[in-house]
Amino acid sequence: MRDDRERLRDVLEAIERIEKYAVGGREALASEELIQTQVVYHLMIIGEACRALSADFQTKHLAEVWALAAGLRNVIVMSTLASIWGLSGM
């Protein structure tokens, strides 16, 4: 089982990759599907890593922040699934 330190390493690595892909700014993000995919993927990694942090860690270190990051991952996944399946209202 992975510990909190490894999860936080995942978050930092995902942030570094987002920064790398987002260097072109909003215009590149808005116009290039590959960049969009990479940024969304790494946001999902951040959310999943935050969701898996121990309750003890989350309590000691601004629990709301971790819940928001994990919630973002859920929104991304549900929006993607809704798009794939042609569902509306998500």
Image (cartoon, helix red, strand yellow):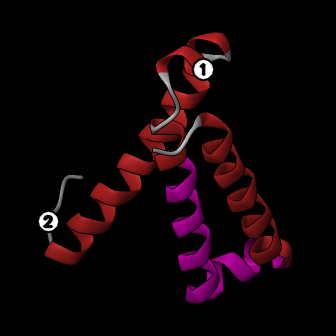
* SS type, badge 2: loop
Q: Residues within 10 Å of mark 2 (few under 14, many from 20)?
A: few
* Residue highlighted by disc 1: 57
Asked whether residue 62 is drawn in magenta, I would say no
Figure quadrant of residue 50: top right
Residue nearest the viewer, comparing 25 with 22: 22
Q: Amino acid at mark 1?
A: Phe
Q: Residue furthest toward the front?
A: 1
* SS type, badge 1: helix
- In this rendering, the answer to whether 83 lies above or below 3 is below
Instruction: Look at the magenta stretch and give its main secondary structure.
Output: helix
Residue at (15%, 74%) from the top-left corner? 86
Asked whether residue 44 is drawn in magenta, I would say yes
* Residue highlighted by disc 2: 87
What segment carries the magenta color? 24-46
Report how far apart the C-alphas of labels 1 and 2 lie in the structure: 37 Å
Residue at (52%, 68%) from the top-left corner? 41
- In this rendering, the answer to whether 62 lies above or below 88 is above
Residue nearest the viewer, comparing 36 with 56: 56
